Amino acid sequence: MNQNKSILLTGGTGLIGIKLTEQLLAKGWRVSHLSRSAGKNPQVKTFLWDVDKGEIDPACIDGVDVVVHLAGAAIADKRWTDERKKEIIDSRAKSIRLIYNLLGTKKHQVTSIVSASAIGYYSDRGDELLTEESPPNTDFMARCCVEWENAVDEGQKLGLRIVKFRTGVVLAVDGALKLMAQPVKLYVGSPLGSGKQWVPWIHWQDVVDMYMLGIENESFAGVYNQVAPNPVTNGQLTKAIASQLHKPLWAPKVPPFVLKLIMGEMSTIVLGSTKVSAQKIEDAGFKFKYPDITSALAEIYG
């Protein structure tokens, strides 16, 4: 049990933040959140910050051992205007710098930073199998992840243990899966583009368990891909969802130009092919609860 251990989460009210908070509380951690607004969970103390204004409650780090950085403006909520792109990057990079500025000026006991990143780091790479050593891509998603990770790495100057997880497409009842399942439920499900592009997916429970490993194992450091060990193509994923929902797939594939028309530059999220290796995290001793797409979807829709 960790009665004496205290953790501060940014992005604690997001999909993973909520589930991770529950698991930490269940294991006896003291959990607090950094948020733009007051929290709703009576077990969690919420401190306020405003990243744009550079404001943060200095009391947020009192007694804290580990900071988990999950905050970031949603990637796919709005079109990628220049202003939105800046917002997407600042909400990730500027926010962790705000915490580091505080750690640099105030007495504290923080030892570790466990941060999200994303497989957007590699972006669209066809059939190449990508490891943590693979170089980043050069498009907006990749630039965003590079700036994000560089900002997180600035914590090394403060002598902190740094863990970064490059998260894939998280499958849960809400989020990306809901969007993918909607057309299938309406009998108009079909692969997007060629359907041959790789989707580096992961079940939400494995994401939470991986964060727990990064938080609790004090010898754990560096960057890890946060994806299931068995990637699938967009076509295979669509088929697996349809099979799980007992719906036929008869609609023609959605042509790339239609998606580009609807989504603009953001269409790379669904048309890009990113085949990502989970070897490094498995070698570190992590055991996946949902290593294959069938078991993952069966649990979610079960």
Image (tube, rainbow, N blue to C red):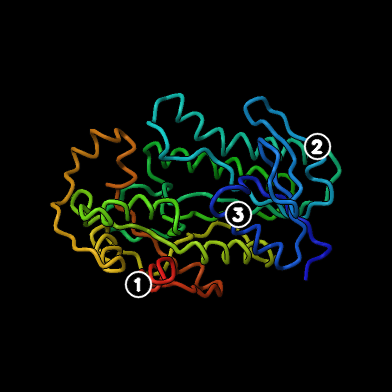
**Image x and y of residue 290, in percent:** 45, 72
Mark 1 closeness class: few <14, some 14–19, many ≥20 residues within 10 Å:
some
Pointer 1 or 3: first along the chain: 3
- Report the number of numbered marks: 3
Mark 3 closeness class: few <14, some 14–19, many ≥20 residues within 10 Å:
some
Instruction: Please give the name of the residue rendered at 45% of the width and 59% of the height, measured from the top-left corner.
Output: 172
Instruction: Please give the name of the residue rendered at 84% of the width and 51% of the height, measured from the top-left corner.
Output: 63
| Label 2 secondary element | helix
Amino acid tagged 2: Pro
Q: Which residue is mark 2?
A: 58
**Quarter of the figure with the N terminus:** bottom right
Circles 2 and 3: CB atoms closer than 8 Å:
no
Q: Which residue is mark 3?
A: 18
Q: Nearer the viewer, mark 2 or mark 3?
A: 3
Q: CA distance from mark 1 to mark 3?
A: 25 Å
Instruction: Please give the name of the residue rendered at 65% of the width and 52% of the height, measured from the top-left corner.
Output: 68
Is 240 in front, or is 273? 240
Circles 1 and 3: CB atoms closer than 8 Å:
no
Q: CA distance from mark 2 to mark 1?
A: 46 Å
Judge left or right: residue 65 versus residue 245: right
Pointer 2 or 1: first along the chain: 2
Amino acid tagged 1: Thr
Q: Nearer the viewer, mark 2 or mark 1?
A: 1
Q: Which residue is mark 1?
A: 294
Instruction: Please give the name of the residue rendered at 84% of the width and 62% of the height, measured from the top-left corner.
Output: 4
* Residue located farthest toward the front when viewing the structure as drawn: 186
**Image x and y of residue 173, in percent:** 44, 58
| Label 3 secondary element | helix
